Amino acid sequence: MYHRGLPLLALLLMLSQACAERERIGIGPTEPQVSPAVTGTYAATRFLVEREGRVNDLIGEPDTRLDLRLNGDGSARGQLKIGTDPQLRTKSDLLGTWRLSVPNLVTFDFTSPTFLEEVGFQIVHDGLRGEWFGDDVRVVIELKKLD
């Protein structure tokens, strides 16, 4: 015997399971997600700046560095220093938060605004990789996880 409420019951059960799975893997519009796999200390190993078809890796220059510490409570701290590129020149102590969203994207919110907040960093095998596009410039940053 077929009951009219069975399809609705089946649909509700599937939605419930989907929501539980989303929560289990950290997807969804709820509170920002963090992941123990992402927490740790990072240092930039590449800081490529492409302008007018020319690429320059600022990491080899003495006045450029980016170090970050991502904590399990969602806090982030570090330092960004770019001293040689006139368009990107900055020195900032980074203090704020980080979150993990889908698909494996790490984003930041710092108390002192930097272009890093506009970069979505993808999780890669040994760290994070992000790209940013500004006025006539493209920046690629690779962060290696140190611990």
Image: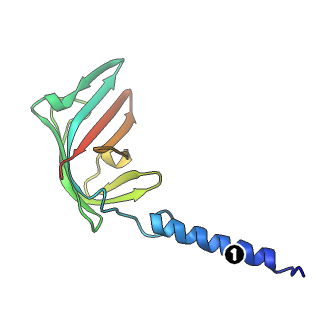
Q: Residues within 10 Å of mark 1 (few under 14, many from 20)?
A: few
Q: Position of residue 8 (x, y in %)?
A: 77, 76
Task: State how many labels appear.
Answer: 1
Q: Position of residue 77 (x, y in %)?
A: 20, 57
Please identify the residue farthest to the front as the structure is shown: 1
Out of 62 and 127, give the one closest to the viewer.
127
For mark 1, what is the residue?
12
Residue drawn at point x = 36 percent, y = 30 percent = 138
Q: Is residue 101 above or below residue 23?
A: above
Q: Is residue 83 above or below residue 27?
A: above
Q: Is residue 58 left or right of residue 13?
A: left
- When asked about the image quadrant of residue 58, the answer is top left
Residue drawn at point x = 60 percent, y = 71 percent = 17
Q: Is residue 18 left or right of residue 55?
A: right
Residue drawn at point x = 15 percent, y = 28 percent = 60
State which quarter of the image contains the N terminus: bottom right
Q: Position of residue 84 (x, y in %)?
A: 16, 29
Mark yes or no: residue 85 visible.
no
Q: Amino acid at mark 1?
A: Leu
